Image (spheres, grey):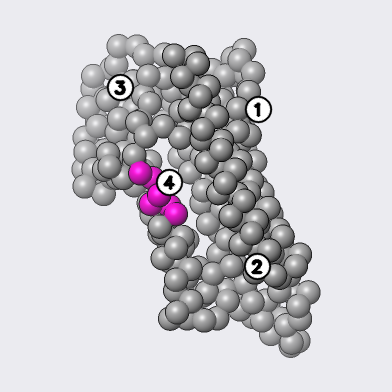
Amino acid sequence: MMFVITPKLPHLRAVSRWTDKIERRMNFAASAWEFRHRFWIFGAWFWIAFSAYRIDPRNFGQSIAEALCGLAHRDATLSAVRLVYLVGVILTVLAAWLRTWATAYIRPDVMVDAELHTHTVIAEGPYRYVRNPLYLGTNLMALGYAVMASRLGAVLLIAGIFLFNYRIILREERELTLAQGENYLRFRRAVPRLWPSLVPRAVASEREPNWGSGLLGEMFFWGLALALLVFTITFDIRIYFLTLGLSFGVYFLCLGLIGRNKRRKA
């Protein structure tokens, strides 16, 4: 089900207060170019983070296992390392599931679109608990994949993805405030930005999610989760890269299907 807040005449004083606050932070917000190319920027930052192995060759997941086993005065075993990686797998699966749930309400063509959509504010499904479930899912994916990086790479990956997501969110908040006015401000006051509420903060409506569309839009994230799971089971980097390559292939196939469906509806 989906509750959509449709545009109304804004309360000018409230809008002015919020836009002033947002304007003060706009120098830190993502540019229109960054928003249009956000997927490639995410990918580039992953590449930068994993390139840090040239500086720091120690794996972060193994380092965590060694630190935890050290607290128990034991040597780190392969099983201990695999357990740390399993936590990463759980985080990536949670990320893929959360993003699928969110995309099932906004449609995959909106999710992958280079342009920012501000005609409605969706307050259904995960959006009843957190305003930005897609970016929360990406943050969880970065946390999960940190076990694959070096110690320095893990810091770069988490800090970079979290920071870029925050800048994207600032841009979206500004545009939605300008487009929706008081309507969006009520939603913003009710629903937390990234830390989910334990109870719904918006009233549900009658629309059901389209889970098929949600899966179509988020197959790449499910592929990332699968690749990490495969590596956790096998510790074979060749099989990992094979699975990861297949994930990219599936992603571009899904993009084609999303574009075709969009053209049919146009």
Which residue does the numbered mark 2 point to in the structure image? 238
Q: CA distance from mark 2 to mark 4?
A: 25 Å
Q: Which residue is mark 4?
A: 39
Is the residue 98 above or below the residue 115 in the image? below
Magenta residues span: 37-43
- Counting residues from the start of the chain, the first of labels 3 and 4 encountered is 4
Instruction: Write down the residue under mark 1.
Output: 212
Q: CA distance from mark 1 to mark 4?
A: 22 Å
Q: CA gap, disc 3 to disc 4?
A: 24 Å
- Which percent across, then down, holds residue 112? 45, 35
Which of discs 2 and 1 lies nearer the camera? The answer is 2
- Judged by its main secondary structure, the magenta piece is helix
Q: Residue at x 55, y 42 (%)?
A: 251
The numbered dot on residue 179 is 3
Q: Secondary structure at mark 3?
A: helix
Instruction: Determine whether the residue tagged by mark 4 lies in a helix, strand or loop.
Output: helix
